[in-house]
Amino acid sequence: MPALTFTAPPHPSTAVNKKPAVTQDPQHPDPHLLPSFSPSTFEHHNEPVIYLPPLLSSLPASLPSDSVLPVPPPSQAPLHTESRLPHIDPASLSLHRALHHFHPATPSYAAVPYAEGFNWSELELPEDEEREWYVVAFRSKRRDGSDGTPLYEADRLAHEEAVQNGGLIMYWYGVPDPTTGLNLATCIWQSRKHALAANSRPHHIRAMRLAAASFSEYSLERHVLRKVRGERGIHVEQYTSGDVGW
């Protein structure tokens, strides 16, 4: 299959972490710089490829500094938004801490079932906590010849808008496959109500309208991230109905 031709929008974190141009050291690449890929990138690669770090919502300014436990340094540091969440509950704070280590489990994350695409089994929370969170996954296929720049700008504004209005814990956006154009973006929310409220915000509406110009195919998936008391791990389940989180 011949490679598609399109302009891939940069990772949203580039607007948050503005850095001067640098020369990449192939032995110690900067995780904040957008990597480039070609169909030959994975021909001789045996380990999972970590495309981009998660973009975590900055914590509320009112949160006491001693209430936030230090996070062990992950192999690839996460990025944080300029805007801060207005509030966050204790269990979501624990999830936020665990998500510092979030990354794809396979280079084919956009083509496999959502629960298999990321390292959920490696994320742990305190045993005594129990909660559920609402998850949205946006699967897409880039339109051949498309320019994603207008969509990226609208997406960046919609992201900051969502953080300011509360509920968004993490946003992650992958890199379109250079051959198939497939990609995946995902958000984790404190509740379904937070996610539904974000849908009616003006920047989100504009971003969704621009999606048709950049994608030949796109679809939404909804999941539930569940933490059961007495266990440390979290589980990904398909959303069926009703409220999720609070």
Image (cartoon, rainbow, N blue to C red):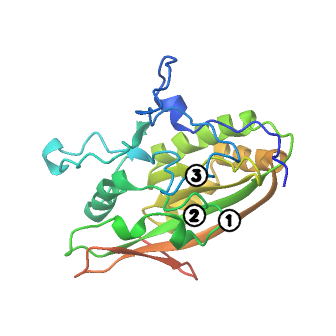
Q: Are marks 1 and 2 in contact (CB under 8 Å)?
A: yes
Left or right: residue 242 versus residue 123 is right
Quadrant where the image shows the C terminus: bottom left
30, 137: nearer the viewer: 30
Residue type highlighted by circle 1? Leu
Quadrant where the image shows the N terminus: bottom right
* Residue plotted at (21% across, 69% down): 126
The residues tagged by marks 3 and 1 sit, at their Cα atoms, a distance apart of 32 Å
Q: Which quadrant would residue 112 be assigned to in this image? A: bottom right
Q: Is residue 114 visible?
A: yes
Q: Nearer the viewer, mark 3 or mark 2?
A: 3
Q: Position of residue 224 (x, y in %)?
A: 49, 74
> Which residue has dot 2 on it?
136
Mark found first going from the N terminus, 3 or 1: 3
> Which residue has dot 3 on it?
44
Mark found first going from the N terminus, 1 or 2: 2
